[in-house]
Image: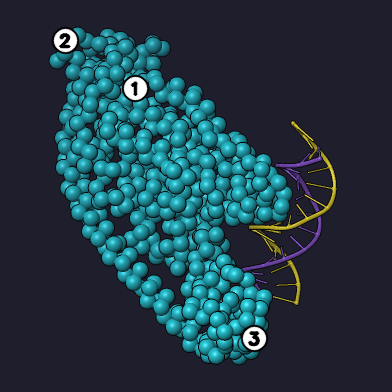
Chain colours: A cyan, B purple, C yellow
DNA sequence: CGCCTTTGACCTGCGC
DNA sequence: GCGCAGGTCAAAGGCG
């Protein structure tokens, strides 16, 4: 039990396993079934039918002249199983190439597969004759030609991608160097500003310093002897008196700490009360810190997800403290406060989208000041990471912060496109980044997220992609799975992440069926718990080497 | 009985 | 200064 900010008691329930794992069961069970052809199936073995009704048997003749009249599901699944067991030849150093080619191949294959299913259905309904040899041959020839052309095109794309990847790696290495140099410069600048502030302060409080210098030394003062003095505030020209008797031992407040240490260094006078009485003198670095904290507090992360539930389960415990009808939205907005620790500053707003009421908009604000259960850790990471991301771009409202090299994530997921998966709102009263999980089935968005995460990781790690768990669509090699598993575990996402990885490894290792994946992605977008888990996992990856470090500790300990 | 939600009042910032 | 809208507070009531 602990108390909230207003002294009310609230029950703290630690949900280490999380209720989410249960919610994945049904999802997981469906993922065990393969419902579509693999990449190889499309390129070399399975029968297809042309969209115009012609039957195509790509490769069947070569396999011994056996003509198949439809996709043999048993063969198909057997082949898929075989493919799953077979190690992939993907080069780990350039994972994107194969992935993007897989995407292309899957697009081609999926079109053929869809055509096949469509015609098959028509055949079942008697709309298409089964023995139209001419149509079959025509369709077969057409599709073979198209397939050959696509393979050639695919090869060209592969080469282009190879070049692009090389350039990409070179650029990211170069960028890493630049970022490091910039960080060093920033650090040097901070040190310089810090010392300048101290000098400035010493100049401004020259009178009290003199007074302090004139005061009796601690050793010469009686233990209970009072010492009085006065300070002239150069800014307001007001004289302020101070006295040593009521001063506290320390003043841990943001306002007093720095100045207190300056004044008392080597002087031995307890000056907290003095510090409290000199707010006008406390500028420079402390105000910067306050600005930083205020911005962190105001920076918001908004998550859009389809859900029928009133709220998404993100692993945290919330107390509702208000509800308000916002202008222009018939649905009320609910206000929640984190109750997992006393005075936790994190707030959450939940509101349905005015345009599409099936979309739940959850907005997070602030950073938790306490340890989090595994289920909640990743969502906290994303809010922290996004808030930091916003912070680095918050100096202006023009979005130039996106040009900050540290904002690669933002730039990767927020290209100049109206269909971005994430957006920064500069016009909103608070800087807000919106993560749109209603569009997770969109391969473009998926690719953007992947790119963003890879870029972040490549910067944060060694400049190569090798150490990043490729969760989106990269085949998971055995050693990599271990790495991913460890990272997931250490990140604290626990079984939620493991479920996700398991699911992804089952469905993504071979990309057996785009249709399957699309349906799963749709399910993801429609499943509140999974959406939350997805965000969690995503945020873990996003924050794994950056701001998220602050949230890793609890679970990795 | 204690915790949580509801809801009207109050506070604050912003634009006119 | 005023009005509006968003955000927060806190008393009252509901629920287990």
Q: Are marks 3 and 2 on the same chain?
A: yes
Measure how far apart labels 3 and 2 are at the Cα level: 106 Å
Image coords of residue A498 (percent x, y): 41, 32
- Residue at the spot 28% in from the left edge and 43% down from the top edge: A467
Mark closer to the observer (3, 2) = 3
Q: Which mark is residue A228?
A: 3
Of labels 1 and 2, the one closer to you:
1
Where in the figure is residue A485, as x and y percent of width and height? 36, 34
* Quarter of the image that includes the C terminus of chain A: top left
Quadrant location of the N terminus of chain A? top right
**Residue A7 vs residue A546, the one in the foreground:** A7
Label 2, on which residue? A65
Q: Of callouts 3 and 2, which one flags the residue occurring earlier in the amino acid sequence?
A: 2
Whether residue A297 sits left or right of residue A50 in the image: it is right
Can the viewer see residue A331?
no
Residue bearing the label numbered 1: A36
Q: Which element carries disc 2, helix, strand or loop?
A: loop
Q: CA distance from mark 1 to mark 2?
A: 24 Å
Asked if both marks, 1 and 2, belong to the same chain, the answer given is yes
Vertical order, A127 against A516 (above or below): above
Badges 1 and 3, same chain: yes
Number of other residues with Cα within 10 Å of mark 3, as a class: few under 14, some 14 to 19, many 20 or more: few
Quadrant of res A93 = top left
- Above or below A285: residue A354: above
């Amino acid at each position: 039990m602990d108390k909230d900010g207003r002294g009310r008691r609230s029950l703290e329930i630690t949900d280490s396993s999380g209720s989410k794992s249960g919610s994945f069961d049904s999802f997981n069970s469906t993922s065990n079934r393969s419902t579509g052809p693999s990449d190889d199936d499309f390129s070399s073995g399975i029968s297809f039918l042309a969209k115009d009704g012609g039957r195509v048997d790509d490769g069947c003749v070569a396999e011994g002249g056996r003509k198949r009249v439809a996709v043999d599901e048993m063969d198909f699944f057997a082949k898929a199983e075989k493919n799953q067991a077979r190690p992939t030849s993907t080069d780990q150093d350039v994972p994107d190439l194969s992935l993007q080619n897989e995407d292309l191949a899957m697009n081609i294959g999926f079109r053929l597969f869809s055509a096949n299913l469509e015609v098959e259905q028509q055949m079942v309904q008697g709309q298409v004759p089964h023995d139209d040899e001419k149509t079959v041959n025509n369709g077969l020839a057409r599709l073979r030609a198209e397939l050959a052309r696509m393979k050639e095109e695919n090869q060209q794309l592969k080469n282009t991608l190879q070049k692009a990847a090389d350039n990409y790696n070179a650029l990211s290495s170069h960028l890493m160097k630049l970022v490091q140099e910039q960080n060093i410069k920033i650090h040097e600048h901070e040190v310089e500003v810090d010392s300048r502030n101290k000098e400035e302060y010493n100049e401004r409080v020259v009178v009290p310093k003199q007074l302090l210098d004139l005061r009796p030394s601690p050793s010469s003062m009686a233990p209970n002897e009072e010492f009085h003095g006065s300070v002239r505030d150069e800014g307001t020209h007001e004289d302020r008196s101070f006295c040593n008797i009521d001063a506290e031992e320390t003043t841990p407040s943001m306002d007093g700490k720095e100045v207190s240490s300056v004044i008392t260094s080597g002087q031995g006078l307890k000056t907290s009360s003095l510090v409290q009485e000199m707010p006008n003198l406390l500028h420079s670095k402390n105000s910067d810190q306050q600005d930083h904290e205020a911005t962190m507090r105001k920076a918001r992360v908004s998550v859009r997800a389809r859900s029928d539930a009133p709220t998404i389960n993100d692993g945290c415990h919330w107390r509702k403290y208000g509800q308000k009808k916002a202008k222009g939205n018939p649905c009320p907005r609910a206000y929640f406060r984190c109750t997992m620790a006393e005075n936790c500053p994190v707030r959450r707003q939940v509101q349905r989208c005015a345009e599409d009421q099936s979309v739940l908009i959850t907005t997070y604000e602030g950073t938790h000041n306490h340890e989090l259960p595994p289920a909640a850790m990743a969502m906290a990471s994303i809010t922290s990471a996004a808030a930091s991301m916003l912070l680095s771009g918050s100096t202006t409202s023009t979005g130039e912060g996106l040009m900050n090299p540290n904002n690669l994530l933002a730039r990767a997921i927020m290209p100049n496109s109206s269909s971005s998966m994430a957006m920064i709102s500069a016009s909103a009263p608070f800087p807000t980044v919106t993560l749109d999980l209603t569009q997770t089935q969109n391969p473009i968005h998926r690719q953007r997220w992947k790119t963003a995460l890879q870029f972040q990781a490549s910067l944060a790690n060694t400049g190569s992609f090798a150490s990043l768990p490729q969760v989106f669509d990269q085949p998971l090699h055995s050693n990599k799975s271990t790495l991913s598993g460890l990272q997931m575990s250490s990140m604290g996402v626990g079984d939620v992440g493991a479920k996700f990885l398991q699911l992804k490894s089952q469905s993504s290792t071979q990309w057996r069926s785009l249709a399957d994946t699309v349906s799963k992605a749709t399910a993801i977008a429609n499943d509140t718990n999974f959406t939350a888990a997805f965000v969690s996992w995503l945020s873990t990856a996003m924050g794994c080497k950056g701001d998220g470090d602050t949230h890793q500790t609890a679970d990795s300990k």
